[in-house]
Image (spheres, rainbow, N blue to C red):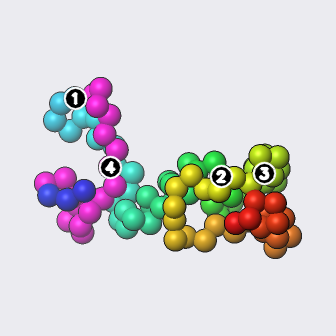
Amino acid sequence: MSGADATLAGAKLTARNPYDSGVGRGNYDLADGDPEEWWSFYVWYMDKNRPLPPAKAFDEYRLQDFERRKAEGFPKPLYPSNIPTPEATKEQQAERKKIGGW
């Protein structure tokens, strides 16, 4: 986003709620700095076919997520990306490559 809605430092990532109108209403800043990095994180997190992103908040869910994707045959990611998304362990990565082929 740029123009009047941009921060002094440049672009920002903003979500708009089309049902909440009015000046300054319905806009929710998601990331003021480095919006491309944040957007990549959101896409990675929302793509159910990728492993969970690296963050301690997701650690307790990694094994459950891995087993769910394994049961589905490790389908390829829904959205293309140049960001590598490895599994939590080398063994899991090898299993995904063997079963899912990616």
* Residue type beneath disc 1: Ser
Q: Nearer the viewer, mark 3 or mark 1?
A: 3
First to last magenta residue range: 4-20
Alpha carbons under labels 1 and 2: distance apart:
35 Å
- Predominant secondary structure in magenta? loop
Are dots 3 and 2 in contact, CB under 8 Å?
no
Q: Residues within 10 Å of mark 2 (few under 14, many from 20)?
A: many
Q: SS at mark 3?
A: loop
Q: SS at mark 2?
A: loop
Q: Which label number is shown at residue 21? A: 1
Q: Nearer the viewer, mark 3 or mark 2?
A: 3
Earlier residue among tags 3 and 1: 1
Alpha carbons under labels 4 and 1: distance apart:
15 Å
Earlier residue among tags 2 and 4: 4
* Residue type beneath disc 2: Asn
Q: Which label number is shown at residue 73? A: 3
Quadrant containing the N terminus is bottom left
